Image (tube, rainbow, N blue to C red):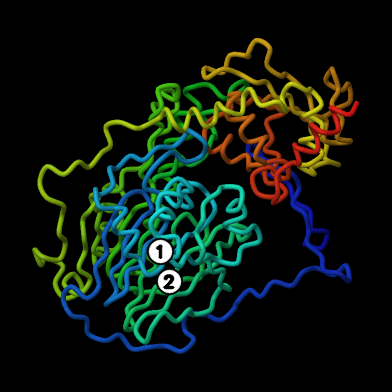
């Protein structure tokens, strides 16, 4: 600890050396290890609830509707279209009245900027009918709605609230947004309290609130599935055989199940609901990912929780199913505690409207920008990442990741931000990134984050040596400029030459 150095254990995964954070006086940044629990501020005793007073309805993926007295609160409405460019599609069919539910909402919480939570296609549809629905987000380092102006979506009441502070809705209802301990720059979770009864939604947080969370809440919900990464399915070469990838996925999914089960056991909520994992790689071109990117079974998690902590009531809802909090708290066996949708209601989506979204991505392919090879320098200078010993080769491909005839195939040396014709002779880490041309050019044109490429399974990667370059990926996935490249000026300058 005196020299702030470490050595990775043998055969472990490795990444860049961690950067020690310092303040303006070059001293170490002090971290408060035992902060107070903010939800304990102004504590309230739980009041008795009437049947039907608090109802929780699952819509799809991470989207829940909470009826709390006379208020309606909706979480993370992704209800139409894809997420992560074209890589994710909804597994569950939302209730047919989902738009009416959104229009009736008194407030909407969006946990973070990932497109399976902040769905611009969904909000665009909502804005046509009710643009003034109040939306609440946490005050993250990267603004949740950083892309709003470019998106063309006209939502007019977006509220950015501080972390760890109760937001009073009315005399009975308040909520508090907390940051993630692993990804504080973008991820959040939420506590909703109605008449002293707490509902905790940890969403996608890896370590919500740094691991400090309220115990014995009435209802806890969290993700469970895994699979929200291009690793290892999109990697090849070296150890990345199909057998190695299958075993890795199996092991990691089991680790996630055990972690979630232990978290529930430690927090001891009265009710637990696994959600926020119901996506599918539905496009035919992603059949390999769909086959190999196995997700956890929520019922398996529930069985594990029951084994560890039998007092927790678990609920795995179908789309449109509603939980009556008062009934379940009073008697978990009450037949009216959970109302499933009518028999015959479709649970799983059977078809997806791919074409308009694929066409939207493909529109960038023939953009005038890409007639000029100098777009490459323009884009990476705009991106602002340099002074790092890494060389990447980007190869534009078709949907099957075959190099595109006439497509771009270029090198970027981030040590001095140059674009060499050949790989440099010095000792430098190297990554080869094959990427679907339509998605890459869409991302470049609009200045989007590379989560669309990586989490959306739009790349195939090789790296030498096998090291995860956190600084590179973190920059392109989270820290790109908030405004897109100025392609208009770029073209004007070229035409003057």
| Residue 448 location (% of width, % of height) | 63, 42
Q: Quadrant of the C terminus?
A: top right
Tell me: residue 42, above or below residue 274.
below
Q: Which badge, 2 or 1, comes first in the chain's sequence?
A: 2
Label 2 to label 1: alpha-carbon separation: 6 Å
Tell me: residue 450, above or below residue 234.
below
Q: In this rendered view, identify the residue nearer to me: 234 or 77.
A: 77
Give SS at disc 2.
strand
| Residue 26 location (% of width, % of height) | 88, 67
Label 1 Cα crowd, 10 Å radius (few <14 / some 14-19 / many 20+): many
Tell me: residue 254, above or below residue 338.
above
Label 2 Cα crowd, 10 Å radius (few <14 / some 14-19 / many 20+): many
Q: Residue at x 82, y 39 (%)?
A: 381
Q: In this rendered view, identify the residue nearer to me: 366 or 319.
A: 366
Q: Residue at x 33, y 39 (%)?
A: 91
| Residue 143 location (% of width, % of height) | 62, 59
Give SS at disc 1.
strand
| Residue 424 location (% of width, % of height) | 87, 23
Q: Are marks 2 and 1 in contact (CB under 8 Å)?
A: yes
Q: Quadrant of the N terminus?
A: bottom right
Where on the picture, by quarter, is residue 375? top right
Q: Which residue is mark 1?
A: 201
Report the number of discs.
Answer: 2
Give left or right: position of 200 versus 309.
right
Give left or right: position of 361 versus 434.
left
Q: Which residue is mark 2?
A: 191
Q: Residue at x 42, y 53 (%)?
A: 128
């Amino acid at each position: 600890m005196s020299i702030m150095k470490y050595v990775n254990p043998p055969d472990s995964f490795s990444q860049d050396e961690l950067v020690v954070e310092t303040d303006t006086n070059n001293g170490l940044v002090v971290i408060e290890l035992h902060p107070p629990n903010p939800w304990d501020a102004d504590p309230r005793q739980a009041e008795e609830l009437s049947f039907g007073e608090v109802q929780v309805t699952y819509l799809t993926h991470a989207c829940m509707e909470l009826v709390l007295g006379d208020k309606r609160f909706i979480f993370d409405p992704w209800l139409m279209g894809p997420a992560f460019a074209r890589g994710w599609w909804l597994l569950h069919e939302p209730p047919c009245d989902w738009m009416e539910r959104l229009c009736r909402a008194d407030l909407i919480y969006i946990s973070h900027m990932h497109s399976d939570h902040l769905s611009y296609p969904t909000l665009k549809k909502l804005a046509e009918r009710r643009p003034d629905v109040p939306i609440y987000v946490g005050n993250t380092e990267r603004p949740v709605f950083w892309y709003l102006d470019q998106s063309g979506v006209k939502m007019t009441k977006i509220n950015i609230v501080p972390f760890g502070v109760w937001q009073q809705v009315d005399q009975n209802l308040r909520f508090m947004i907390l940051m993630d301990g692993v990804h504080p720059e973008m991820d959040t979770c939420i506590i909703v309290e109605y008449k002293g009864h707490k509902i905790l939604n940890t969403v996608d947080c890896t370590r919500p609130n740094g691991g400090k969370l309220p115990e014995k809440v009435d209802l806890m919900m969290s993700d469970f599935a895994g699979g929200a990464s291009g690793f290892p399915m999109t990697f090849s070469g070296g150890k990345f055989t199909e057998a190695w990838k299958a075993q890795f996925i199996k092991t990691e999914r089991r680790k996630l199940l055990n972690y979630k089960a232990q978290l529930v056991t430690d927090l001891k909520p009265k009710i637990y609901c696994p959600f926020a994992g119901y996506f599918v790689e539905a496009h035919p071109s992603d059949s390999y990912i769909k086959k190999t990117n196995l997700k956890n079974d929520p019922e398996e998690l529930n069985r594990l929780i029951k084994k560890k902590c039998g007092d927790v009531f678990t609920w795995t809802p179908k789309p449109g199913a509603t939980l009556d909090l008062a009934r379940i708290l009073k008697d978990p066996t009450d037949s009216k505690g959970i109302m499933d949708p009518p028999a015959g209601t479709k649970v799983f989506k059977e078809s997806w409207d791919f074409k308009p979204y694929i066409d939207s991505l493909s529109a960038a392919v023939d953009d005038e920008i890409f007639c000029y090879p100098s777009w490459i320098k323009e884009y990476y200078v705009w991106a602002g990442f340099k002074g790092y010993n890494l060389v990447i080769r980007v190869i534009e491909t078709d949907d099957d990741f075959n190099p595109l005839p006439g497509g771009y195939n270029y090198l970027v040396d981030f040590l001095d931000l140059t674009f060499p014709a050949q790989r440099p002779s010095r000792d430098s880490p190297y990554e080869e990134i094959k990427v679907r041309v339509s998605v890459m050019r869409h991302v470049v044109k609009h200045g989007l984050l590379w989560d669309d490429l990586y989490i959306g399974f739009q790349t195939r990667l090789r790296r030498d040596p096998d090291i995860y370059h956190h600084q590179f990926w973190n920059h392109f996935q989270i820290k790109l400029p908030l405004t897109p490249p100025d392609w208009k000026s770029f073209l004007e300058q070229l035409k003057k030459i």
